[in-house]
């Protein structure tokens, strides 16, 4: 297992697919502004699901008039005013083996957006840390992983080039320098989902952020 940051990563190309895999578009990644209320219907008077405590990347699955339909933890759509949303150019696409339901993957990772961070935590109800989150997701796919990020990084097929990454691959970082101390799940176009202390929970970030660009050590499939 690498213990120091690698210099073999290139951030200029996109992931690839193989013939036995099928691509499924899940929605468009959007950035929703701090303080935005998420309604249960496209109506300002509809009950609320949540009010965002900070800027969040979320998954938009539809638009209706001046409203954007956002995927919520219960699998339903929440609605936010279009003017509160910054729409990225990134369509979230999962590359899956033929016959696998893409909605299954959606539930496994994206439904946990906003679950709070808790060091050593393993539960969506009480909070999760980075490796607890990754372990939970992979266990639901029938893959058993060790508890810590350093131990997890020893499992799986190594991915050594950024252009070979595809959604579902695990990313491992040495944020504090030296040994691996953080992990997340790649979702495509440089974006990944993780449970981070600085985000106060499960959130989406991009590998172009300096803290992650300089600390990425390895990836595993």
Image (cartoon, rainbow, N blue to C red):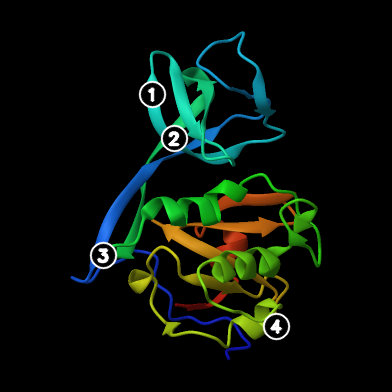
> How much space separates mark 1 and mark 2, taking CA atoms?
8 Å
Image quadrant where residue 158 sits: bottom left
The reply to whether residue 204 is in sight is: yes
Judge whether 92 appears above or below 147 on screen: above
Q: Are marks 3 and 1 in contact (CB under 8 Å)?
A: no
Which residue is identified by label 4? 178
Task: Nearest to the eye among marks 4 and 1: give it.
Answer: 1
Evaluate if marks 1 and 2 touch, with contact meaning CB atoms under 8 Å apart.
yes
The percent coordinates of residue 89 (x first, y second) are 35, 41
- Residues at marks 3 and 1, CA–CA distance in whole angstroms: 29 Å
Displayed quadrant of residue 52: top right
Q: Depth check: give the residue in front, 30 or 174.
A: 30
In the image shown, does 110 or 3 lie closer to the viewer?
110
Number of the front mark, 4 or 2: 2
SS for tag 3?
loop
Q: Quadrant of residue 109?
A: bottom right
Q: Is residue 14 visible?
A: no
Mark 3 crowdedness (10 Å alpha carbons): few <14, some 14-19, many ≥20: few
Which residue corresponds to mark 3?
Answer: 98
Q: Specify the quadrant that holds the C terminus.
A: bottom left
Query: Tag 2, which secondary structure?
Result: strand
CA gap, disc 4 to disc 2? 37 Å
Q: Identify the residue under disc 2.
A: 60
On screen, residue 126 above or below 211: above
Q: Who comes first in sequence, dot 3 or dot 1? A: 1
Identify residue for label 1: 63
User: Compared with residue 128, is residue 43 higher up or lower down, i.e. above or below?
Assistant: above
Structural crowding at the residue carrying mark 1, measured as other residues with C-alpha within 10 Å and reported as few (<14), some (14–19) or many (≥20):
some
* Label located before the other in sequence (3 or 2): 2
């Amino acid at each position: 297992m690498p213990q120091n940051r690698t210099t073999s990563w290139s951030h200029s190309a996109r992931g690839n697919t193989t013939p036995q895999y099928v691509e499924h578009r899940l929605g468009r990644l959007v950035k929703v502004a701090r303080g935005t209320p998420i309604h249960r219907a496209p109506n300002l008077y509809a009950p609320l699901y949540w009010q965002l405590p900070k800027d969040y990347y979320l998954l938009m699955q539809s638009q209706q008039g001046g409203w954007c339909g956002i995927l919520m933890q219960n699998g339903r759509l929440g609605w936010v005013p279009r003017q509160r949303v910054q729409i990225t150019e990134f369509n979230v696409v999962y590359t899956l083996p033929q016959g696998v339901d893409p909605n299954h993957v959606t539930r496994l990772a994206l439904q946990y957006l906003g679950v709070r961070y808790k060091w050593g935590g393993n539960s969506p109800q009480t909070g999760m840390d980075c490796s607890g989150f990754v372990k939970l997701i992979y266990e639901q796919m029938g893959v058993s992983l060790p508890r810590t990020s350093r131990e997890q990084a020893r499992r799986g097929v190594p991915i050594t080039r950024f252009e070979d990454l595809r959604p579902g691959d695990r990313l491992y970082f040495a944020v504090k320098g030296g040994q691996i101390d953080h992990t997340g799940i790649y979702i495509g176009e440089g974006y990944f989902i993780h449970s981070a202390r600085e985000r106060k929970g499960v959130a989406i970030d991009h590998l172009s952020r300096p803290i992650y660009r300089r600390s990425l050590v390895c990836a595993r499939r």
